[in-house]
Amino acid sequence: MKNLIQKWNSINLIKRIICGLIVGIILGLAIPQASVISILGDLFVGALRGIAPPLVFCATWEKARKQT
């Protein structure tokens, strides 16, 4: 199992993201009534909504700090 995780981590991030998207699409089409997938999706979107404002604030703050 450790070897499998090391191989997965050695793959380029873009390829891992594409793999995840493909697996998600397949699961969504094959098992649309699965509530676990829906819950994970809702958690993911909620996490993105929660982290976006602080990231934008920090990026704006840093940009303004570097200009002065």
Image: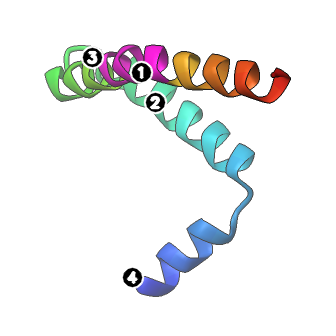
Q: Could you tell me which secondary element the residue under label 2 belongs to?
A: helix
Front disc: 3 or 4: 3
> What secondary structure predominates along the stretch shown in magenta?
helix
- Foreground mark, 3 or 2, reads 3
Left or right side of 24 for 22? right
Point out the tag, 1 or 4, that comes first from the N-terminus: 4
Q: Amino acid at mark 3?
A: Asp
Q: Residue at x 58, y 33 (%)?
A: 22
Kindly identify the residue that appears in the image at 48 percent across and 74 percent down: 5
Q: Nearer the viewer, mark 1 or mark 3?
A: 1
Q: Which numbered marker is on residue 48?
A: 1
Label 1 crowd bin: few (<14), some (14–19), many (20+), radius 10 Å: few
Q: Which residue is mark 3?
A: 42
Q: Which residue is mark 4?
A: 1
Q: Could you tell which of marks 3 and 4 lies nearer the N-terminus?
A: 4
Q: Position of residue 66 (x, y in %)?
A: 79, 29
What secondary structure is marked by label 3? helix
Disc 2 residue crowd, few under 14, some 14–19, many 20+, Cα 10 Å:
some
Give the label on residue 24, or none.
Answer: 2
Q: Is 46 covered by the magenta stretch?
A: yes
Distance Cα–Cα, label 2 vs label 1:
17 Å
| Residue reaching furthest to the bottom | 3
Tags 3 and 4 in contact by the CB under 8 Å rule? Answer: no
Q: Nearer the viewer, residue 61 or 40?
A: 61
- Three-letter code, disc 1: Leu
The quarter holding residue 34 reads top left
The amino acid pointed to by label 2 is: Gly
Q: Quadrant of the N terminus?
A: bottom left
Name which quarter of the figure residue 12 lies in.
Answer: bottom right
Q: Which percent across, then down, holds residue 17?
A: 62, 40
